[in-house]
Image (spheres, coloured by chain):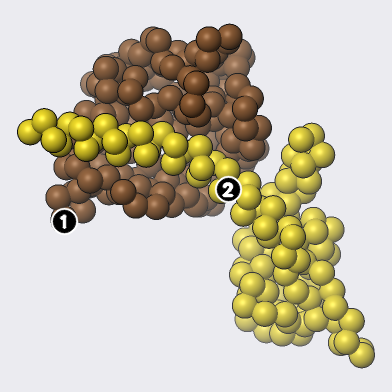
Chain colours: A yellow, B brown
Amino acid sequence: MVILMTALDTTFAALSDPTRRAILARLAQGEATVQDLAKPFSISQPAISRHLKVLEDAGLIETRIQGTARPRRIKQDAVNELWDWLSQFREVLERNYSRLDNLLTTLNEKD
Amino acid sequence: MSKLTLRTEGDTQAIVTRRFAAPPARVFDAHTKPELLQKWCLGPDGWTMPVCICEPHPGGNIRYEWSNGAGGFHLTGEFLTVEKPNRTVHVERMFLPDPTPDNHVETRFDDDGAGGTLMTMTMTLPDAATRKMMLDTGMADGMEVSYARLETVL
């Protein structure tokens, strides 16, 4: 539990920056190189590389080696973990709301 | 009735939406009348809410106490704005047993145009770390804090 929460701390720190979130959104559509990523963001390639390092250290993306190219891509495990984190919250909420659905049905029938 | 959506916005907000098959006035009542809240706002199975104070008017108090027979925790809050049956704004904090930072909650109950209600709950926490803590506690399924976090929203 503690290990997981520490990992999530790093993940959320990595996600706290809007440029890094935009980079992740771009990578969610498919892998891309530093050059590809620098274009839409009008930021220098070294700046993009620094953001990519933060994302990679947080385990959110990984580098694939293809000849001299180094395309980055989303690391599915990490994204799944993040999804689990959000879906747990959702699950607990849904338990309450499905009870509320039943209550509302009962109240509607009384009309 | 429909899938709940949950998303974060910026660094400090979490937004939940859900549709219900009843008009806004009824869903509003279910969120503000103690005898109704005690029937559904319970978290995981096995928990009850023996104490429920909810005074839906500006300055009105909120106090929810949950118990699983062996232990429990509570939440307090105050209403800031109440526009029955479409909107409430309140602040709340949980005691675990120390108080958590205030969660500012705006809840909208809008007519969905089909006889039902679209609820939109916007929670604003003081900072990113607090939001994370609130959402995070849901992971500890079976632990008291998970119920606490759930209730931040309700």
In the image, residue A97 above or below residue A52: above
- Label 2 crowding class (10 Å Cα cut-off): few <14, some 14-19, many 20+? some
Q: Chain of mark 2?
A: A
1 and 2 marks on the same chain: no
Instruction: Tell me the element at label 1.
Output: loop
Determine whether B18 is above or below B97 in the image.
below
Alpha-carbon distance for marks 1 and 2?
A: 29 Å
Name, please, the residue furthest toward the right: A67
Q: Please indicate whether residue A3 sits to the left or right of residue B26 in the image.
A: right
**Is residue A106 left or right of B7 when viewed as pictured?**
left
> Residue B151, position in %: x, y?
47, 28
Q: Residue at x 73, y 58 (%)?
A: A78
Task: In this rendered view, identify the residue nearer to me: B140 or B128.
Answer: B140
- What residue sits 50% from the left and 44% below the top? A90
Mark number, residue A48: none
Tell me which chain the residue with mark 1 is part of. Answer: B
Could you tell me which secondary element the residue under label 2 belongs to?
A: helix
Q: Mark 1: which amino acid?
A: Gly
Instruction: Find residue B130 and report its image quarter.
Output: top right
Q: Quadrant of residue A61?
A: bottom right
Residue B71, how many percent across, how many down?
Answer: 58, 10
Residue in the image at 62% along x and 32% along y: B141
Query: Mark 2 highlights which residue?
Result: A86
Residue at x 47% of width, y 49% of height: B6
Whether residues under marks 1 and 2 lie with C-beta atoms below 8 angstroms apart, the answer is: no
User: Amino acid type of disc 2?
Assistant: Leu
Residue A38 visible in rendering: no
Residue for badge 1: B113
Rendered position, B24 above or below B91: below
